[in-house]
Amino acid sequence: MWLKLCFLLLYFLVLFVLARVFEAVVWYETGFFATQLVDPVALSFRKLRTILECRGLGHSGLPEKKDVRELVEKSGDLMEGELYSALKEEEASESVSSTNFSGEMHFYELVEDTKDGIWLVQVIANDRSPLVGKVHWEKMVKKVSRFGIRAGTFNCSSDPRYCKRRGWLKSTLIMSVPQTSTSKGKVMLKEYSGRKIEVEHIFKWITAHAASRIKTIYNSEHLREEWNKSDQYRVKIYLFASLDQPPAFFSALSVKFTGRVEFIFVNVENWDNKSYMEEIGISKTPSYILRTPEGIYRYGSNAGEFISLRAMDSFLRSLQPEVNDLFVLSLVLVNLMAWMDLFITQGATIKRFVVLISTLGTYNSLLIISWLPVLGFLQLPYLDSFYEYSLKLFRYSNTTTLASWVRADWMFYSSHPALFLSTYLGHGLLIDYFEKKRRRNNNNDEVNANNLEWLSSLWDWYTSYLFHPIASFQHFPFDSDWDEDPDLFLERLAFPDLWLHPLIPTDYIKNLPMWRFKCLGVHSDEEMLETLQDSESDSDSENKEVFSSEKDISEDDEPNTFQRPREGEPRCRADADTFSCATKCCPKEQCERKARSYGSYSTAEEPDWSAWPPEMLHCTECVVCLEHFEGGCLLMGLPCGHVFHQNCIVMWLAGGRHCCPVCRWASYKKKQPYTHPQPLSSDSPS
C-alpha cells in the first residue's frame, strides 16, 4: 500500500511539473501567462458577449461594443485564462439534457427535497402545448446549466391529480429556490408571470430571484455596521461593484454554499463618500473580498482565481469544505492508488485484472468502513473547537500561492480528461517497465507466466484451500494441546485412494528436523572431511555415476525449496512405489573406503544418541532405501518420530505421499512427541 501511495504522489508531482511546462510553452508562443490581465478594449464584440454570458450578466439591451466593454469592466478583471476557458466552453457544442419527471414523488425527490440548488421546470398542462418551444428550451437549458441550475420537464398527463392540486391548469415555468439562508431549509416555488417568452427575459427573471437571496448594501453606514458585526458566519465574501444586481454565478454560489459562506453585494454605484472603504483596505472596484477570522483575502490575486462559477466554487470548497467533499476526495485518491496494482502486478493479463478487482473491492470497503466512525465522531457535541481548528487550518493552507497553483492545475486537468488519463497511463507503463526489469534481475519466473499457466496455478491454489484447508494453513512445528488429530480420520473418509488427492503445499518440509548421524568414538567432522578429501581422488568415476543418476530426476518432482546435498555428503534416491534403493547412500567401494577411513557404524560401535532430537525414535536403518545409517549421513525426522535419510524422505514426500512410510501418520501434522525412557545409572553406553 505504501508503495502505491509513493507512486501516486510521484504522479501528482509529474502533473504539477507538466502544468508548469505547458505554461512555459504558452508563454513562449504567445507571450502571456494565464494570470495576465486582458484589456477589454482589444477584444472583439463576440468575445465580450461570451465573457458576459459566462459571468451571467444580461446584455440584450446593449447593442454597442462600448456598453458591453464597460459592463465587463464593472463585473471584474479579465484574465487570459478566463478568456481561454470561456471561448473553449462556447466552442464545445455539448447538448445538455433535461430531466423528465414521471410523477409527484419523482418531482418531490429531485426538486422540493433538494435544499442546495436551483431548478427550472417547464410544466406542460393536459392537451396544451409547452410554453417554451423545443429550440428555445434547449438554448435555455444550456444557458442555465453553466451556473449549476438544473432543468426539467413535468408533463401533467403523467400525474393530472398533482397538477390540479398545485393549480397548474396551463403550461408555465416553475423555479425552485431555497427560501431561507440556512442549510437544508425550505424550498419555495415561483411561477413565471412574464409576457415575453424569450431566453434573455426568462434568464433575467431567474437571476433576479436568485439575487434577492443575497444581502445588498447601498450606503457606507450600512457597510460599517455589517463589517463589524459578528454572527454565525465565519466566512463572508463581499462583492464591491457598480452593478444593478450581482452576476448570476455569484447568486448561484450563494445558493450552493447556503449555511457555510455568506454572500454580500455592496452596490457602490451612487456612493459619494468612499472613505470607509479605504479604511478597510478596499482601494478599487470591482473587488471580490473574502473576510475570515484570520484576515482579509482579495480574490483574483493568485493563479486560477477567475471571475467564473467553476473557479470560485473550487476556491470556496477548499476553504470551507463539507464532509461529502472530503469523502469524494478520499474516494478518488483511493481508487487512483488501487489502479496502480494493474501496473505493479507482473505476469499474466488475467492475473493483473483479478488482482485489480480484488484491490478495488478491498480498498473501497476499507474506506467506507473507516468513514463510519469518523462520521459518528464528528457528531459529538464536544468537538466544536476541533472542527473550528480544522477549518482554520484549511483556510490558512488554501490561501497560499501553492494552493492556488494546485486549484488551477485541477481545473486544467479536469477540463482536459484525455490528457489526465493519458498521463496516468504513461506513468503506469513506466512503473510496469521498471517493475518488470527489477523482477527479471531477481530471476522471478512469474514475469514470463502466460494466462493458462496462471489460471492453472490459481485453480490448484483454490482446490488446495477448498479441499484441504488444514494442510494449507498449518506449519510444522507448532504447539498444540491435542493428543490425537481427528482430521486424519475425516480425511481418510472424505478422500479414499480411488479419488484424486488434494494438493498440499510442501513448505512444511524445510521445517522438519535434520541432523547428522554420528557414532561414539569416531573422529571429529573436520578430521573426517580431511580423510574424505584424500580418498576423493580415487573415487571420481564413482561420483560421476552418482551425479549422472541424479540429473535424471526432473525438476518438477523436486521442490525448489530444498537444497541439493553438498559435495561429500551421502546421497540417496528412493523409489516411492517399491521402497527399494535405486542408489545407495554411497557407492559400495566408496562406502568401504569411508568406513575404513573414519569409521562407519558397526555392531561394535554405539550411535551417539545425544545428537538426535529428543522426540525422534532410535533406529539405525532407513526403511525407504533399506540401508544402514553411515557415519556423517544427513538424517531427517517426521512428526511421528520415525527417522530416514534426508534425501530418501524428501523424494518420498515430494512425490505426493505426505505421510510416514512406516506408520502412515500425516507428515504435516504434529503428534504427541515420543518420550525415551531414562536409562538407569548402571546402564552406560559402550
Image (cartoon, rainbow, N blue to C red):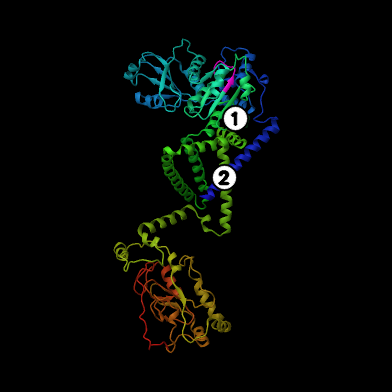
Quarter of the figure that contains the C terminus: bottom left
Quarter of the view holding residue 228: top right
Graded by Cα atoms within 10 Å as few (under 14), some (14 to 19) or many (20 or more), the crowding at tag 1 reads some
Q: Main secondary structure of the magenta part?
A: loop
Closest to the observer: 353 or 12?
12
Looking at the image, is mark 2 or mark 1 earlier in the sequence? Answer: 2
Which label belongs to residue 626? none
Left or right: 107 as drawn, with respect to 398: left
* Residue 187 image position (x, y, % from top left): 41, 22
Whether residue 674 is visible: yes
Q: Residue at x 39, y 26 (%)?
A: 113
- Tag shown at residue 297: 1
Q: Secondary structure at mark 1?
A: strand
Viewer-nearest of discs 2 and 1 = 1
Q: Amino acid at mark 1?
A: Tyr
Q: Is residue 313 above or below residue 556?
A: above
Magenta region, residue range: 239-246
- The answer to whether one can see residue 146 in this image is no
Question: In this rendering, is residue 69 above or below 626?
Answer: above
Residue 329 rendering spot, x and y as whole percentages: 50, 38
Amino acid type assigned to the residue bearing label 2 in the image: Leu
Q: Nearer the viewer, residue 316 or 170?
A: 316
Q: Is residue 241 magenta?
A: yes
Q: Residue at x 53, y 55 (%)?
A: 447
The image shows residue 663 at horizontal and vertical percentages of 34, 73
Q: Position of residue 74 (x, y in %)?
A: 61, 19
The answer to whether the residues at label 2 and label 1 have Cβ atoms under 8 Å apart is no
What is the number of callouts on the image?
Answer: 2
**Residue nearer the viewer, 499 or 330:** 330
Residue 9 numbered mark, or none: 2
